[in-house]
Image: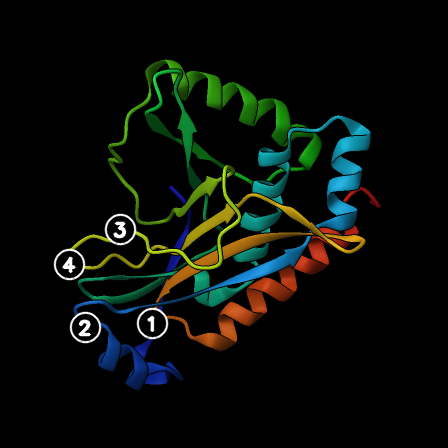
Amino acid sequence: MAAAKRIDLAGYARREHYRYFRDMAYPYVGTTVNVDITGFIETVKAQGLPFFLSFLYQAVGAANQIPALRQRMDAQGIIEFDRCPSSHTVAREDGTYVYCNLDCGMPFSQFLPYAQEEQRRAREGGSIQEEEAQAFFFVSTLPWVTYTSLIQPTPFPADSNPRLTWGKYFDQGDRTLMPVSLLCHHALADGLHLAQFYRALEERLEGFGQG
């Protein structure tokens, strides 16, 4: 279980926003952005790396850079995790899927063999039930379509786990772009934090393979 600290609401800058949005019937805010993955995909192809896991590592790493995206709501208020793992969908041969949980807080060279083994285990014996899901970033992908908007299922009452989704990449001129969606609970995050995520993601993608 990831370590967490409780937020002191008395000194919390967004406490009015938290109280305003926390009980709304649909309290989520999100956007879809066409992210430039040109250099990233060139490196992935040149090194023969798995695209999905390579991108997941960068996306979850970027999300973990934003404190607001590591915050979750509970009955007592808000807690902030020091690092959040991911829970992503893994396809089975029959067209259904299961969830696979990953810790992205390790060097990329160690992450890939670990993640591939976890995916294999999930595919053989996983399910769509999460016993303890509070800390996760929920991750999924639509590799079959390039989309411009996305509507996601959410529970009632609302949870506060950010949801990351990306679709089929496409060429635009000499660049390769990919739609990437981020959905967050508005009591904890707003447009500023979404923009910070995309900026962090682009910086990580630009630096991929250079270290």
**Mark before the other along the chain sequence, 3 or 2:** 2
Task: Identify the residue at image location x=20%, y=52%.
Answer: 155
The kind of residue tagged 1 is His
**Mark before the other along the chain sequence, 1 or 3:** 3
**Residue 208 left/right relative to 143:** right
The colouring scheme, among rainbow, by chain, secondary structure or one colour, is rainbow
Mark 2 to mark 4 CA distance (whole Å): 9 Å
Other residues around mark 3 within 10 Å, as few (<14) / some (14–19) / many (≥20): few
Residue on which disc 2 sits? 24
**Mark before the other along the chain sequence, 2 or 4:** 2
Residue on which disc 3 sits? 153
Q: Of tags 3 and 2, which is closer to the observer?
A: 3
Residue on which disc 1 sits? 186
Mark 3 to mark 4 CA distance (whole Å): 12 Å
The kind of residue tagged 2 is Met
**Mark before the other along the chain sequence, 1 or 2:** 2
Q: Position of residue 121 (x, y in %)?
A: 43, 17
Closer-to-camera residue (185/44)? 44
**Residue 40 left/right relative to 76:** right
Other residues around mark 4 within 10 Å, as few (<14) / some (14–19) / many (≥20): few
Q: Considering the numbered disc 2 on the image, is that residue within a helix, a strand or a loop?
A: loop
Mark 3 to mark 2 CA distance (whole Å): 16 Å
Other residues around mark 1 within 10 Å, as few (<14) / some (14–19) / many (≥20): many
Q: Position of residue 181 (x, y in %)?
A: 48, 56
Q: Considering the numbered disc 4 on the image, is that residue within a helix, a strand or a loop?
A: loop
Residue on which disc 4 sits? 157
Assign the N terminus to one quadrant of the image.
Answer: top left
Mark 1 to mark 2 CA distance (whole Å): 10 Å
Q: Considering the numbered disc 3 on the image, is that residue within a helix, a strand or a loop?
A: loop
Q: Is residue 6 above or below residue 152?
A: below
